[in-house]
Image: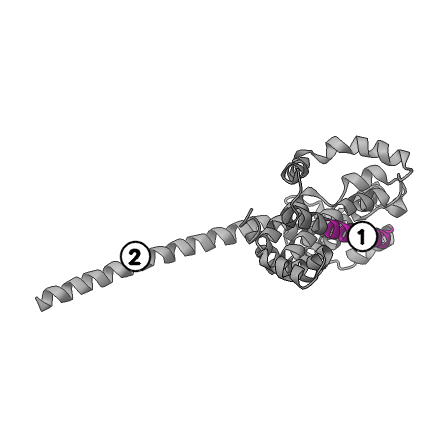
């Protein structure tokens, strides 16, 4: 019987080993797929970086080369010499900073109202707010242009900044869903202590919504920094162009008849993308936390 028990234990031990090996293999396959997909998605960005360090002749070679034969670091300062690239960067900083600030603050106030205040038609209004997300920007761009022309805002930064001080549906949704996960007891305790609605928002809600605020800030920053359609439609003066339109403008002024300078455009694209990459890596922990906990309630 002792031998039978030992045999059963051995068999059970082998079974556990086989069972434990299966998740290990699956995890290894999962990691392999993640690495493969990461390489696939990162390849265009890597290609842009390497192309920004090539000479114009090497960039036109066929078959193309991945590693530059001659690393030309001068391509980056050359972008500033060929056009007002520094001005484009400053324009993007101004527009993105002001628009992001207005979008996050206004969306936070609206989201707090939808999450905490009870009033007739609240759910209907929230549904109407969400319904605006299904409208493509191309549908509303013509009416907006006519409106801003009547307001004499064309060729100014106002159309790119002021509308975002009323919030956007996506950021309102994310913040509202996150606020719903916070216990309402916090609001009641603050009310008993004499806090006003705005006091509850800034002293109770905001400190507990750090990850959600960081998430919408990153998304808002990316949207305004990469904006092309609205600046392209509303701005006419090259000195006022942000980076998205500025790079398009550079294609018409740095191309010489005999030798295209696409390597300079690649360098400009890398400099435009770098702040977004840095911001995302710095805030990725908050972004993942904010998205993961959004919508758990409500």
Which element is circle 1 on? helix
Q: What stretch is highlighted in magenta?
A: 84-106
Q: Position of residue 47 (x, y in %)?
A: 65, 50
Residue 114 visible within the image: yes
Q: In which quarter of the image is the N terminus?
A: bottom left
Instruction: Kindly identify the residue that appears in the image at 11 percent across and 64 percent down.
Output: 4
The secondary structure that dominates the magenta segment is helix
Counting from the top left corner in percent of width and height, residue 249 is at 83, 43
Q: Residue furthest right?
A: 152
Task: Residue 229: name its quadrant.
Answer: top right
Q: Residue at x 89, y 40 (%)?
A: 153
Does the magenta run of residues contain 105? Answer: yes
In the drawing, what numbered circle is on residue 115? none
Q: Is residue 215 above or below residue 133?
A: below
- In the depicted view, which residue is nearer to us: 83 or 96? 96
Residue 14 pos. (x, y %): 23, 61
- Name the residue carrying label 2: 19
Outermost residue toward the left in this view:
1
Looking at this view, is 90 or 99 the one in front? 99
> According to the image, label 1 marks what residue?
98
Up the image or down, 68 lies above or below 119; here it is below
């Amino acid at each position: 019987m002792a031998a039978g028990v030992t045999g059963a234990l051995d068999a059970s031990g082998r079974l556990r080993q086989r069972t434990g090996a299966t998740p290990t293999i699956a995890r290894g396959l999962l990691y392999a797929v993640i690495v493969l997909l990461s390489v696939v998605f990162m390849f265009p960005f890597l290609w842009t970086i390497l192309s920004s360090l090539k000479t114009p002749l090497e960039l036109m070679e066929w078959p193309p080369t991945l590693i530059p034969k001659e690393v030309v670091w001068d391509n980056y300062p050359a972008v500033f010499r060929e056009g007002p690239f520094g001005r484009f960067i400053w324009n993007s900083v101004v527009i993105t900073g002001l628009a992001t600030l207005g979008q996050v603050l206004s969306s936070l106030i609206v989201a707090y109202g939808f999450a905490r205040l009870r009033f007739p038609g609240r759910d209907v209004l929230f549904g109407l707010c969400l319904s605006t997300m299904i409208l493509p920007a191309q549908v509303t761009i013509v009416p907006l242009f006519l409106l801003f022309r009547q307001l004499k805002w064309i060729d100014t930064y106002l159309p790119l900044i002021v509308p975002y001080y009323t919030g956007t549906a996506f950021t309102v949704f994310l913040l509202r869903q996150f606020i719903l996960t916070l216990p309402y007891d916090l609001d009641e305790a603050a009310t008993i202590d004499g806090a006003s609605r705005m006091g509850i928002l800034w002293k109770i809600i905001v400190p507990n919504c750090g990850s959600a605020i960081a998430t919408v800030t990153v998304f808002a920053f990316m949207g305004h920094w990469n904006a092309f359609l609205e600046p392209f439609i509303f701005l006419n003066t090259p000195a006022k162009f942000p980076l998205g339109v500025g790079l398009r403008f550079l294609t018409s002024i740095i191309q010489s008849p005999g030798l295209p300078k696409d390597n300079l455009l690649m360098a400009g694209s890398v400099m435009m993308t770098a702040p977004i990459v840095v911001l995302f890596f710095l805030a990725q922990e908050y972004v993942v936390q904010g998205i993961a906990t959004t919508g758990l309630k409500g």
